[in-house]
Image (cartoon, rainbow, N blue to C red):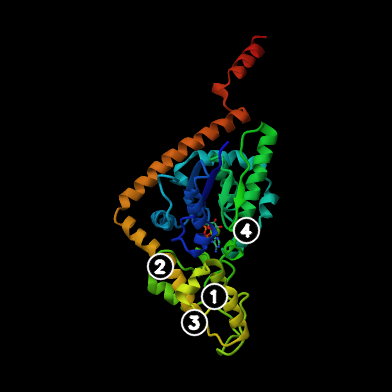
Amino acid sequence: MGKIILTGDRPTGRLHLGHFVGSLRRRVELQNSGLFDKIFIMIADAQALTDNADNPEKIRQNIIEVALDYLSCGIDPAKSTIFIQSQVAELCELAFYYMNLVTVSRLQRNPTVKTEIQMRNFETSIPVGFFTYPISQASDITAFRATTVPAGEDQQPMIEQAREIVRRFNGIYGDTLVEPEILLPDNAACMRLPGTDGKAKMSKSLGNCIYLSDTSEEVRKRVMSMYTDPDHIRVEDPGKVEGNTVFTYLDAFCRPEHFAQYWPDYSSLDELKAHYMRGGLGDVKVKKFLYAILEELLTPIRERRKEWEKDIPAVFDILKRGSEAAREVAAGTLADVRRAMRIDYFDDAELIAEQSRKFQG
Ligand code: ATP
Ligand code: MG
């Protein structure tokens, strides 16, 4: 069997640099590598509603934002199927059966969900849908028989949960589902890009993001006010690079050729870091370098976005066609699942014959 990708994003806001390094950049590379038979990219609106039930308008407005971000980063609808989760009803049915294979205490142990519950102050009022979203995510992944899920580190517990469900399902009902693997970024800084405020994760919900669609001026402001080393007060002071957001971003985005192009005083990031640690190098200079690198990355993305923004109906059409194609694939898996669970009563000739015999004596 071939290699299949499934990934997605919640339409809770525009996409940011964390998404780009954690998953989006990889997806585009994999899409263009030709190594995968199929690539499914899901706008996870149903999952986003699990913690935004009272704000459906937010989700509705952000569907197109996420789709535009995909297209402007180079997701090509001719090579990848982009679809909207809620339009594939089969995913709910799968999740409903998978719920029987997971215990409440297993869900309670999920470290990402734990952190998210705290972040949202849900401690005493966790919506059941939110609590069970790792199960729903397992159905998203398995519905497309995905072998590979390119995602950031926060998704590791979700993939582990999906693998457990697959093993349990196949163990009880026979070999039906495919066990997925996570594909993490190969660079540590990209596993979990911190926010511009230095907080552990750049996240739409924390408002500490540089968005892929930010203007040049917005990016400049964000970079210039970025969290660095609070003890690096005067230029001559020695500075710390660990936990210094500007350097973490350089770890994520800087390539050796950027020095020749934007800052020929140095030949490598190690050399730059050494100078900063020795003292005598001010934050502003390093921030300007980072800004130049980010602008090089973001300018073509912004330009492609402008083009797509001129034809919004075409973008909706891509999503509609993608959702139809996705639905067909998910329906195929659901049919296999029903057969394996022996709840395909009307297609089950053996059941009808056996029951006839039983009642005829
Ligand atoms: P929300 O706050 O609504 O949860 P989010 O910013 O965390 O939004 P998601 O849609 O939950 O974004 O995540 C989509 C994908 O992007 C996942 O694969 C996730 O691992 C990755 N990702 C999100 N934020 C980061 C980050 N800061 N660093 C690396 N990867 C990230
Ligand atoms: Mg998230």
Q: Which amino acid does label 1 sit on?
A: Ser
**Are there few (<14), some (14-19), or many (20+) residues within 10 Å of tag 1?**
some
Query: How much space separates mark 2 and mark 3, taking CA atoms?
Result: 22 Å
Query: How much space separates mark 1 and mark 3, taking CA atoms?
Result: 15 Å
Q: Which of marks 2 and 3 is nearer the N terminus?
A: 2
Residue hosting label 4: 112
**Rendered position, 146 above or below 150:** above
As drawn, the residue found furthest toward the left would be 310
Residue hosting label 2: 214
Query: How much space separates mark 4 and mark 2, taking CA atoms?
Result: 28 Å
Q: What residue type is labelled 3?
A: Lys
Marker disc for residue 325: none
Measured as percent of width and height from the top left, residue 144 is found at: 53, 40
CB under 8 Å between callouts 1 and 4?
no
- Residue visible at 48% across and 73% down in the picture: 260
Classify residue 87 as left or right of residue 173.
left
Query: How much space separates mark 3 and mark 4, taking CA atoms?
Result: 36 Å
Query: How much space separates mark 2 and mark 1, taking CA atoms?
Result: 30 Å
Measured as percent of width and height from the top left, residue 298 is found at: 42, 65
Q: Which of marks 1 and 3 is nearer the N terminus?
A: 1
Marker disc for residue 285: 3
CB under 8 Å between callouts 4 and 2?
no
Residue hosting label 1: 267
Q: Which of marks 2 and 1 is nearer the N terminus?
A: 2
Classify residue 168 as left or right of residue 289.
right
Q: What residue type is labelled 2?
A: Asp
